[in-house]
Image (cartoon, rainbow, N blue to C red):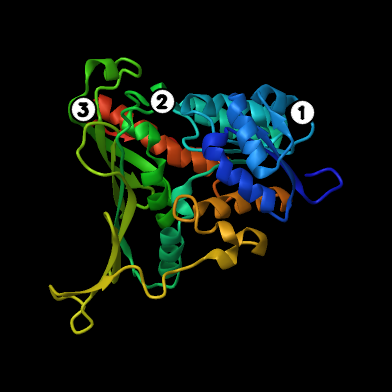
């Protein structure tokens, strides 16, 4: 609950990736003001000047200790996510955080517990479940256009050579939520069990930081709906392919397949169970547009950031605080999505052995 006011005061921590979110919050009608934080004072000055924001902090500790803010949005390196999220929640602040929530099950349990104990919202800002494609698919599924969902597939290919050092050798499934989350959100369930195999060659120096020998990992998940399975492939090194961050949904009536360019298939209207199918190219004309779900003041941001997801994420986080409810990607949901990848890597390290995925609610 906000003290005697109906607008949120938020600080954005980490301004390389965080700049676009700071711009959205600045325009949001339910935000009173935005503060900026970055340890790089040159970046802090540059971004602050560009946005015309004077509240600036050179350390996250300063933000955490301040009573100027109700909420914090963390866009810092992966190894800092769990501890900074805990620090924010324990400081009595609502917390939004870039993916992943953490890289161990213990971290996930701790954040879920801290969110409950402090009665503060935690939201993992998973872009994949607020893209235009996802919102369109969700609408079609709710309208019954897909029929029974038969299978799901998620893909996230990257090459992290030359990125900051904490990426070097990172287990692929520790950063798998972009591929996992849309599948679990579409199915409205959690992953229950996983078998995962690692694949490929890694240089010795890349194996050392995390003890991970795999540049690529591929998992099969049994979902908590007994008749549904999902496949997820994740790569971080040594694969000669352009990047991809996509998902596919296969239904009995309609299927959506997103490899490089999204396409849709439907059964022949002449014989629903013949070998033939009608091919429907995507995007649909007119291309789906969900900016009407946003306040007028931030609709101009709907063409930016991970297929238009950024303003939807920011809006959901702010409204969840004001409406005194859990965010759509709550601490429990975030933990369920993140745990799937952590357990998949554990399976890969044991030759594909079945691993039970914990339930956090």
- Closest to the observer, 257 or 305: 305
Q: Which mark is residue 351?
A: 3
Q: Which residue lies under the disc numbered 1?
A: 66
Image coordinates of residue 83 in percent, x first then y, are 57, 24
Q: CA distance from mark 1 to mark 3?
A: 48 Å
Instruction: Let me know if residue 357 appears in the view.
Output: no
Q: Residues within 10 Å of mark 2 (few under 14, many from 20)?
A: few
Q: Position of residue 229 (x, y in %)?
A: 29, 50
Tag shown at residue 164: 2
Q: x, y (%) of residue 268? A: 20, 78
Say left or right for 129 vs 19.
left
Compared with 332, 303 (above or below) is: below
Q: Tell me residue 44's x, y (percent).
A: 62, 31
Q: Are marks 2 and 3 in contact (CB under 8 Å)?
A: no
Q: Quadrant of the N terminus?
A: top right
In the image, farthest residue toward the left: 275
Q: Which residue is drawn at the image coordinates 62% and 25% (left, top)? A: 41
Q: Quadrant of residue 251?
A: bottom left
Residue that protrudes farthest toward the right in the picture: 4
Q: Secondary structure at mark 1?
A: loop
- Element type where label 3 sits in the image: loop
Q: Find numbered disc 2 in the image and state the secondary structure of the residue it sits on.
A: loop
- Mark 1 Cα within 10 Å, few/some/many (few <14, many 20+)? few
Classify 10 Å Cα crowding around label 3: few (below 14), some (14-19), many (20 and above).
few
Residue 174 visible in the current orientation = yes
How far apart marks 2 and 1 lie (CA) works out to 30 Å
In front: mark 1 or mark 3? Answer: 1
Mark 1 or mark 3: name the one nearer the start of the chain. 1
């Amino acid at each position: 609950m906000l003290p005697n006011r109906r607008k949120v005061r938020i600080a954005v921590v980490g301004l390389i990736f965080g700049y676009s979110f700071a711009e959205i919050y600045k325009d949001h009608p339910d935000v009173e003001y935005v503060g900026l934080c970055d340890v790089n004072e040159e970046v802090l000055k540059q971004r602050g000047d560009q946005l015309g924001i004077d509240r600036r902090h050179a350390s996250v500790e300063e933000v955490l200790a301040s009573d100027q803010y109700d909420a914090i949005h963390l866009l810092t390196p992966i190894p800092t996510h769990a501890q900074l999220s805990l620090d924010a929640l324990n400081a009595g602040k609502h917390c939004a955080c870039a993916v992943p929530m953490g890289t161990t099950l213990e971290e996930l349990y701790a954040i879920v517990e801290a969110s409950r104990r402090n009665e503060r919202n935690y939201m993992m800002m998973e872009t994949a479940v607020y893209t235009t494609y996802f919102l369109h698919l969700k609408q079609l599924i709710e309208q019954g256009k897909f029929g029974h969902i038969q299978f799901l597939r998620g893909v996230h290919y990257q090459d992290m050579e030359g990125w900051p050092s904490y990426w070097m050798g990172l287990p692929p499934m520790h950063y798998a939520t972009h591929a996992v989350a849309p599948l679990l959100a579409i199915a409205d369930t959690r992953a229950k069990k996983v078998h995962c195999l690692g694949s490929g060659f890694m240089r010795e120096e890349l194996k050392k930081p995390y003890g991970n020998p795999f540049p690529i990992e591929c998992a099969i998940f049994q979902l908590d709906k007994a008749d549904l399975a999902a496949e997820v492939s994740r790569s971080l090194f040594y694969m000669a392919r352009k990047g991809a961050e996509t998902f596919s949904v296969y239904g009995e009536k309609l299927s959506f397949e997103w490899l490089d360019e999204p396409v849709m298939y439907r059964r022949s209207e002449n014989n629903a169970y013949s070998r033939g199918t009608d091919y429907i190219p995507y995007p649909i004309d007119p291309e789906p547009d969900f900016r009407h779900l946003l306040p007028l003041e931030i609709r101009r941001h709907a063409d930016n950031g991970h297929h238009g997801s950024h303003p939807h994420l920011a809006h959901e986080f702010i409204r969840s605080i004001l409406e005194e409810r859990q965010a759509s990607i709550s601490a429990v949901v975030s933990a369920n999505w993140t745990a799937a990848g952590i357990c998949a890597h554990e399976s890969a390290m044991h030759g594909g052995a079945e691993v039970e995925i914990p339930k956090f609610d």
